[in-house]
């Protein structure tokens, strides 16, 4: 039985343009024929015909920077501590399905708590649930100074957090071997050092020798290596060591760019978090006084340095850093495309090719679903609008009318945008200020008694009473 899809426009992921009035013919989950609709084979008895003559058909989107275990976290503690790993694993399925509904059929999660994302990857791979194709890292390797060792040394990196603290090259090699045995696809390194007394900003969390040794071992074991790095020094070490992806690389310098070029390293800017934090963080957010300002400076530097790297011929990839409270699942990911066009000066067609074809080089079985041509898996989306003319249409979920994977239309129920929080997660972030008598004088006291209750509180209480 074949499925014949008539496409008003077809973007294969391989060219800069979309062809008008085309057809896809699908059999056994794969594309078996593409070409002009007029030349398409006639449907036979039992074949299915789907008419998208008014729509734009393109490969499913991919995102190389979605943290599925983070649960739209509002703080590092929410990323790492309060919800159990088991709860986070179940929650990550909802996250993955929200991404799929937004048009993302393939995701790379570069840092997860425990074994959450590899487990989700396997559950989805077996077909237990509908969800995107997932490529998974485990915990991010971090030094004492690295991002991911956020907490004071007397807390360290608990086993349920997204960081794995390695205190020596020997421990790092052992951690890489452990994660490889547990089935991660990629090894993640936290290359930015953030906790120290140097005033000059971010510096490398690992030395060149340590970085090179970790990358060599990961590669020996057949893993890809991806790194979080905003700073100059870490970008240079990671590039020299020949990692696969530098995330951010906002302060990469000429030496780093040269090394990246020599070693075939790609850059995935992931600017969405900066841009959303600058545009939308509110004075009541605890980080408002310091973070958006840092983001502004980084964005200004990134525009210059990333453009230099791009002009030098470094391959670019796309991923959004979805999974935080300011970048919730299925809401903003496609804004990263618009940001790459507006802030890095890339063409719309190039960014769309990256999101559909270029990214796949980093994904598990990526060459199976990297374009809409004969032989590939039939993973595609149907868009009401033309993303080549206006890339922002991909941000409107109502304009992504259908998502198909393996030649079958995905039909998922609408899930809440606001991922419900486990009650235990409320154990931090209670107040945004210290209510001295002086401060309290500025407020009218809320009424005592049931009248003053928020909707959420009354729901919890009334349910408990029943
Ligand atoms: Zn990240």
Image (tube, rainbow, N blue to C red):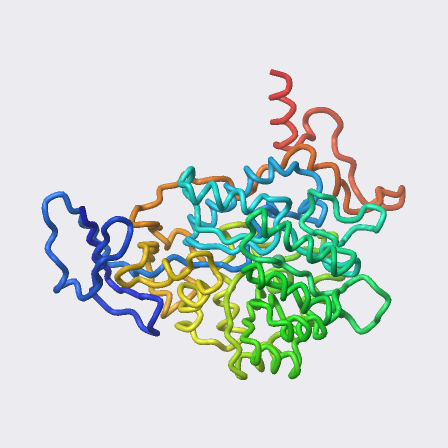
Q: Position of residue 218 (x, y in %)?
A: 61, 61
- In the image, is 384 to the left or to the right of 215? left
Q: Quadrant of residue 82?
A: top right
Please identify the residue farthest to the right as the structure is shown.
Answer: 437
Q: Position of residue 46 (x, y in %)?
A: 14, 43
Looking at the picture, does residue 419 appear above or below residue 361? above
How many circles with numbers are drawn on the protein? 0
Seen from the viewer's position, the closer of residues 111 and 36 is: 111
Seen from the viewer's position, the closer of residues 455 and 290 is: 290
Q: Position of residue 388 (x, y in %)?
A: 36, 69
Seen from the viewer's position, the closer of residues 453 and 42 is: 42
- In the image, is 166 to the left or to the right of 438? left
- In the image, is 196 to the left or to the right of 77? right
Q: Quadrant of residue 384?
A: bottom left
From this viewpoint, is residue 235 visible? yes
Image point (35%, 45%), residue name:
410
Seen from the viewer's position, the closer of residues 419 and 139 is: 139
Which quadrant of the rendered structure holds the C terminus?
Answer: top right
Looking at the picture, does residue 193 appear above or below residue 75? below
Looking at the picture, does residue 422 appear above or below residue 170? above
Q: Position of residue 272 (x, y in %)?
A: 57, 62
């Amino acid at each position: 039985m074949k499925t014949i899809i008539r496409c008003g426009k077809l973007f294969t992921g391989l060219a800069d343009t979309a062809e008008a009035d085309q057809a896809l013919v699908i059999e056994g989950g794969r594309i078996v024929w593409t070409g002009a609709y007029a030349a398409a084979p006639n449907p036979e008895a039992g074949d299915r015909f789907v008419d998208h003559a008014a729509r734009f058909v393109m490969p499913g989107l991919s995102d190389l920077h979605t943290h599925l275990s983070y649960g739209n976290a509002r703080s590092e503690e929410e990323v790492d501590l309060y919800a159990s790993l088991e709860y986070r694993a179940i929650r990550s399925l909802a996250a993955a399905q929200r991404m799929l509904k937004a048009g993302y059929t393939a995701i790379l999660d570069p840092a997860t708590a425990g074994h959450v994302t590899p487990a989700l990857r396997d559950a989805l791979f077996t077909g237990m649930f509908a969800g995107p194709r997932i490529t998974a890292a485990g915990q991010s390797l971090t030094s004492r100074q690295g991002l991911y060792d956020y907490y004071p040394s007397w807390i360290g990196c608990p086993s349920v957090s997204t960081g794995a603290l390695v205190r020596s090259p020997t421990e790092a090699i052992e951690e890489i071997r452990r994660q490889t045995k547990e089935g991660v696809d990629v090894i993640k390194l936290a290359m930015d050092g953030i906790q120290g007394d140097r005033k000059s900003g971010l510096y490398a969390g690992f030395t060149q020798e340590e970085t090179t040794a970790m990358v060599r071992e990961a590669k020996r074991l057949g893993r890809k290596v991806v790194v979080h790095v905003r700073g100059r020094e870490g970008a240079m070490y990671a590039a020299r060591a020949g990692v696969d992806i530098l995330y951010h690389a906002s302060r990469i310098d000429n030496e780093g760019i040269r090394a990246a070029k020599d070693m075939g390293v790609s850059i995935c800017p992931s600017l969405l978090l900066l841009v959303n934090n600058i545009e939308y963080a509110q004075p009541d957010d605890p980080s408002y006084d310091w973070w958006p300002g840092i983001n502004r400076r980084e964005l200004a530097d990134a525009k210059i340095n990333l453009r230099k790297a791009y002009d030098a011929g470094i391959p670019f990839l796309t991923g959004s850093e979805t999974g935080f409270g300011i970048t919730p699942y299925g809401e903003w990911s496609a804004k990263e495309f618009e940001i790459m066009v507006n802030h890095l000066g890339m063409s719309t067609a190039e960014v769309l090719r990256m999101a559909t074809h270029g990214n796949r080089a980093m994904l598990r079985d990526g060459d199976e679903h990297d374009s809409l041509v004969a032989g590939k898996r039939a993973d595609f989306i149907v868009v009401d609008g033309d993303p080549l003319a206006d890339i922002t249409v991909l941000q409107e979920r109502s304009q992504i009318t259908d998502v198909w994977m393996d030649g079958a239309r995905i039909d998922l129920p609408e899930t809440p945008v606001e991922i419900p929080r486990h009650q235990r997660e409320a154990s931090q972030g209670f107040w945004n200020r210290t209510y001295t008598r002086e401060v309290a004088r500025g407020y009218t006291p809320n009424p005592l008694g049931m009248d003053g209750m928020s909707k959420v509180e009354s729901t919890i209480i009334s349910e408990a009473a029943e």
